[in-house]
Amino acid sequence: MERVQVFSLLAGLVILFAVLELVRRGKLKENYSVLWICTTVVIIFFAVFRHLIDWLGSLIGIYYSPSAFFLIAFIFLTLITVQFSVVISKLTDRNKDLAQEVALLRHRLDELEKRAASQPPCIDNP
């Protein structure tokens, strides 16, 4: 096994371990870790079977195999970016909804406080 293969294999295993550890500690949600785990599996796969990156590169018309690897990495990073954009969009909508709900509740509370302040106090005589 060449040095680049050993380095790629170790890098993939370190990233995989880091992602799994972040999930275990609760710092990364499972649904966000799927693409990271897929990425590391692909890195490990192509580190072990290096000839397949050459074959894949020639299949899609790339004759310098590291460029094929960078293309794969770019695709995965694009997928991760799209996933985060979807999550951010959902959180933005949720944040807006929550802000509107708080504003409505605050308005209702102000109305109730005004109504309570304008009414004379109720005194019970036993």
Image (cartoon, helix red, strand yellow):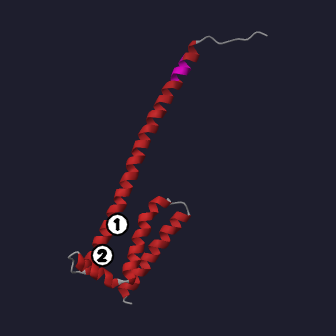
Q: CA distance from mark 2 to mark 1?
A: 11 Å
| Residue 32: % across, % down | 45, 60
The residue wearing badge 1 is 76
Q: Say few, some or many: other residues with alpha carbon within 10 Å of mark 2 (under 14 / 14 to 19 / 20 or more).
A: some
Do labels 2 and 1 touch, CB within 8 Å? no
Q: Amino acid at mark 1?
A: Phe
| Residue 109: % across, % down | 53, 25
As drawn, 41 above or below 78: below
Which region shows up in magenta? 110-114
Q: Secondary structure at mark 2?
A: helix
Upstream in the sequence, badge 2 or badge 1? 2
Residue at 37% across, 87% down: 3
Q: Say few, some or many: other residues with alpha carbon within 10 Å of mark 1 (under 14 / 14 to 19 / 20 or more).
A: some
As drawn, 64 above or below 38: below
**Label annotation for residue 69:** 2
| Quadrant of the image containing the C terminus | top right
One can see residue 28 in this view: no
Q: Amino acid at mark 2?
A: Phe
